[in-house]
Amino acid sequence: MAQILLLDDDAAVCDLVPAFLQDLHTVTVVSNWTEITRQIFHHDFDLVLLDVNLPVVSGDKIAEVLRKTTTKPLNIALFSSMDEEALSKLADTVGANGYIVKTLEKRVLRSRISKFLEPRAG
């Protein structure tokens, strides 16, 4: 089971994502940016999902800061319902490993998460 950290301010997303993934992965949910550092410091996550459209500090800015300040190897995905092309460019710009377009379809979300967690040939 992969360990996933989800930062999102939408209560429905914070409820649905763990429910959709409960038999495959463990999901830790935080709803504000101040919890991210504490969680990352105390736990090892296989994937960090960051909602882009957050109040105060956006997920893309958090990704950028994590890349510059954290020595842990982090697998970071921007997680948003914004236009896929724009989300892809934003992920590249801030140094995220990629992006996952939000969906409330269980099968689709599970597939996207699984593909993101697959080991990459290199």
Image: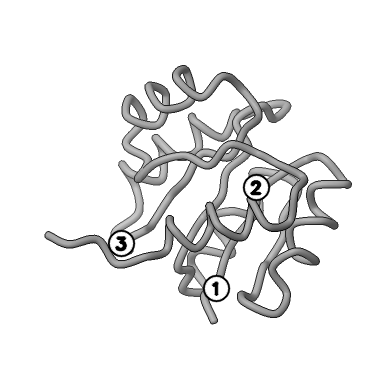
Instruction: Name the residue at 29% across, 67% down.
Output: 119
Q: Is residue 33 above or below residue 61?
A: below
**Left or right of 46: which side holds 68?**
left
First in sequence: mark 2 vs mark 1 = 1
Secondary-structure class at tag 1: strand
Q: Secondary structure at mark 2?
A: helix
Which residue type does callout 3 highlight? Pro
- First along the sequence among labels 1 and 3: 1
Rendered location of residue 95, percent (x, y): 32, 36
User: Callout 3 environment at 10 Å: few (<14), some (14 to 19), or many (20+)?
Assistant: few
Q: Is residue 33 above or below residue 21?
A: above
Q: Given the current orientation, which residue lies at the most extreme front position?
A: 107
Quadrant showing the N terminus: bottom right
Which of the two discs, 2 and 3, labels the residue nearer the N terminus? 2
12 with respect to 45 (left or right):
right
Provide the residue designation for mark 2.
34
- 72 sits left or right of 30 in the view: left
Q: What x and y, as percent, mark residue 118?
A: 36, 65
Front label number (2 vs 3): 3
Circle 3 SS class: loop
Q: Residue at label 3?
A: 73
**Numbered circle sitting on residue 3:** 1
Label 2 – label 3 distance at C-alpha: 20 Å
Q: Residue at x 56, y 50 (%)?
A: 49
